[in-house]
């Protein structure tokens, strides 16, 4: 069973402000996915597809595939619709609403992929069994999740939310990710389910540009629960963001070439036996 969780509201435009850095891990994941079962036309699910820009990259690798992006955010799905339709290779790209916490495939898939989405789903590893069961023989489950939840950006957010000023309104909003597993734990889970699995981690040493770029980054992801909780209270939101901004400036000082923002990510690829 999954714990009950309240999904934050999402801002596709804010999320896409750092699209290049956010896409790079998916391209690294994509490079490690083996060939899909043949000769059938590939059926692919992108779970937590967001604004669809990454989903569209799947059609470059499998041009004849039928690819469906699933997301629980109506705003994200509305943005993703610009990518929907036939693909140049004879495939099809479409989008549908679904919550990764409860999604159970209703047809066989050759690939289920998820890019930076499962960290929002408590107990997501419990869904591996039904997802793998739905894979065609030789199919693959592949995902990556952020693994930087002990980094200053997230630690400071959690500490600020727990201060006396903010605890009543925001307590727990900055610490939603303790359920993320380590690479070796994901590997063990997937091997136990009969898959040939690979798991690894990478720390991307990103250089961000602009004023307060780390704050701008987390506004698209980790800060969403706080922004959702404070929505409508402009004074409180401004005060919180000012306090958090000052903490981030000390933790991630701007340098002559930009602001260095290390970001750890965890990857796993599991292939079902043929």
Image (spheres, grey):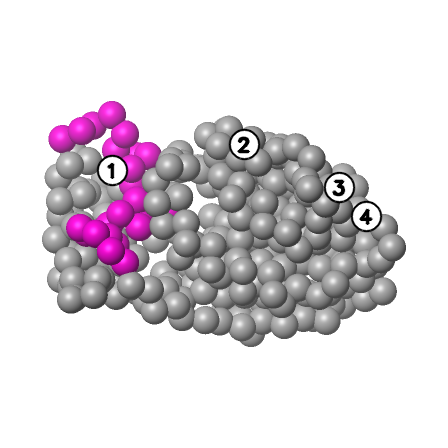
Residue labelled with disc 2:
82
Task: Work out which residue is located at the far top of the displayed protein and give it.
Answer: 232
Q: Is residue 63 visible?
A: yes
Residue labelled with disc 4:
41
Residue labelled with disc 1:
169
Mark nearer the N terminus (4 vs 1): 4
Depicted 34 relative to depicted 114: above or below: below
Q: Is residue 226 magenta?
A: yes
Distance (Cα) linking label 3 and label 1? 50 Å
Query: In this rendering, would 53 be left or right of 239?
Result: right
Local secondary structure at mark 1: helix
Local secondary structure at mark 4: loop
Question: Counting other residues with Cα less than 10 Å from the Cα at mark 1, is it few (<14), some (14-19), or many (20 or more)?
Answer: some
Q: Which mark is residue 50?
A: none
Frontmost of labels 3 and 1 is 3
Mark nearer the N terminus (1 vs 2): 2
> Given contact means CB atoms under 8 Å apart, are the residues at marks 3 and 4 in contact?
no
Which range is magenta?
208-235
Q: Is residue 101 visible?
A: no
Query: In this rendering, would 226 be left or right of 61?
Result: left
Residue labelled with disc 3:
90
Distance (Cα) linking label 4 and label 1? 50 Å
Distance (Cα) linking label 2 and label 4? 23 Å
Distance (Cα) linking label 3 and label 4? 10 Å
Question: Counting other residues with Cα less than 10 Å from the Cα at mark 3, is it few (<14), some (14-19), or many (20 or more)?
Answer: few
Residue 87: give x, y in percent of width and height: 68, 40
Query: In this rendering, would 96 be left or right of 245?
Result: right
């Amino acid at each position: 069973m999954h714990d009950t969780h309240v999904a934050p509201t999402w801002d596709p435009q804010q999320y896409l402000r750092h699209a290049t850095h956010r896409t790079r891990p998916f391209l690294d994941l994509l490079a490690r996915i083996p060939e899909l079962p043949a000769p059938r036309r590939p059926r692919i699910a992108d779970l937590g597809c967001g604004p669809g820009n990454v989903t569209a990259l799947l059609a470059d690798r499998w041009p004849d595939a039928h690819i469906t992006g699933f997301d629980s955010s109506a705003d994200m799905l509305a943005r993703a619709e610009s990518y929907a339709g036939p693909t140049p290779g004879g495939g099809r790209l479409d989008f549908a609403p679904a919550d990764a916490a409860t999604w159970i495939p209703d047809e066989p898939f050759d690939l289920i992929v998820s890019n930076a989405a499962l960290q929002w789903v408590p107990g997501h590893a419990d869904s591996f069994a039904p997802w793998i069961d739905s894979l065609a023989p030789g199919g693959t489950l592949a995902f990556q999740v952020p693994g930087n939840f002990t980094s200053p950006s997230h630690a400071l957010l959690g500490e600020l939310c727990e201060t006396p000023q903010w605890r009543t309104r925001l307590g727990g909003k900055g610490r939603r990710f303790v359920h993320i597993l380590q690479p070796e734990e994901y590997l063990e889970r997937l091997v136990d389910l009969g898959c040939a699995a690979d798991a690894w981690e990478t720390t991307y040493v990103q250089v961000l540009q602009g004023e307060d770029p780390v704050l701008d980054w987390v506004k698209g992801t980790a800060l969403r629960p706080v922004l959702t909780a404070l929505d409508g209270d402009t004074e409180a939101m401004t005060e919180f963001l000012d306090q958090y901004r000052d903490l981030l400036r000390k933790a991630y000082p701007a340098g002559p070439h930009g602001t260095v923002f290390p970001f750890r990510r965890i990857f796993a690829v599991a292939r079902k036996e043929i």
